[in-house]
Each structure stands twice: as C-alpha cells, then as structure tokens.
Image (cartoon, grey):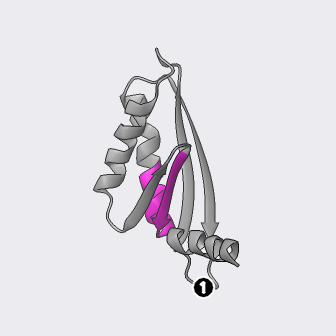
Amino acid sequence: MAIVETTIVPLGTATTSISHYVAACHKVLQEQKGIQYQLTPMGTIIEGDLDLILQAIRKMHEVPFQEGALRVSTTIKIDDRRDKAASMEGKVNAVQEKLIK
C-alpha cells in the first residue's frame, strides 16, 4: 500500500483563490473506490493501491482545465513501503508516540 501526497495548482486563472478547484478535485476522490484520502491545508494525502492512486491523480489533474484554468502544475510525492504495512494514521502515531517519551 502506498501513501501519496499531491498538490494540484491551477495557473492562469482570473483570481488567486483556488478552493473551488480543490473542491472539484476532491469530488473525483469521493468517487474512487479502494483509496482513503485526507485534505490538508497544503495538499492531499492519499492511501491505497499505487495504481489506483495514480489513476485518481490523473483524473484530478484534468479538473482545473475543465474548470477554465489555462495551465496546471501537479506535484506528486510517493511513499511506497513494501517491507511492512504503512498507513497515514500509523505514520502519525509513530511520531506522536516518540513525542510522549
């Protein structure tokens, strides 16, 4: 299972506000089966099968164009751990446990 962080930024828009683009991208995620996701202030974390995640990001990349953006910059960071199961929650918990000690 992979954990992926993505940020999709529309460029060439009439305004600096991008929240409606983000919401439209998240509608794509809501329709996807087999993945979990978490919106953060600076991007989106997605957990699941890497092929499914990349398919979802490809669809999300197209959304700003459909909404009128003239250019889109998409950043993808992949954590694909294969020696043991990893999850968004598990990674956060591992750090929080160390903070308590």
- Helix, strand or loop at disc 1? loop
Q: Which residue lies furthest to the bottom in this view?
A: 84
Q: Which residue is drawn at 51% across and 66% down?
A: 50
Type of the residue with mark 1? Lys
**Quadrant location of the C terminus in the rendered image:** bottom right
- State whether residue 59 is above or below residue 101: above
Q: Is residue 58 magenta?
A: no
Q: Which residue lies furthest to the left in this view?
A: 31
- State whether residue 54 is above or below residue 24: below
Q: Is residue 50 magenta?
A: yes
Instruction: Return the residue nearer the eye: 10 or 23.
Output: 23
Q: Specify the segment rendered in magenta.
A: 43-57
Q: Mark 1 points at which residue?
A: 84
Q: Residue at x 45, y 24 (%)?
A: 69
- State whether residue 14 is above or below residue 23: above
Q: Where is residue 47 in the image (x, y as percent from the top left)?
A: 48, 66
Q: Which residue is drawn at 28% across and 55% down?
A: 31
Instruction: Return the residue nearer the eye: 5 or 33.
Output: 5
Left or right of 91: which side holds 66?
Answer: left
Q: Where is residue 71 in the image (x, y as percent from the top left)?
A: 53, 26
Instruction: Return the residue nearer the eye: 93 or 73.
Output: 93
Q: Which residue lies furthest to the top in this view?
A: 14
- State whether residue 78 is above or below residue 66: below
Instruction: Return the residue nearer the eye: 82 or 20.
Output: 20
Q: Position of residue 68 (x, y in %)?
A: 40, 23
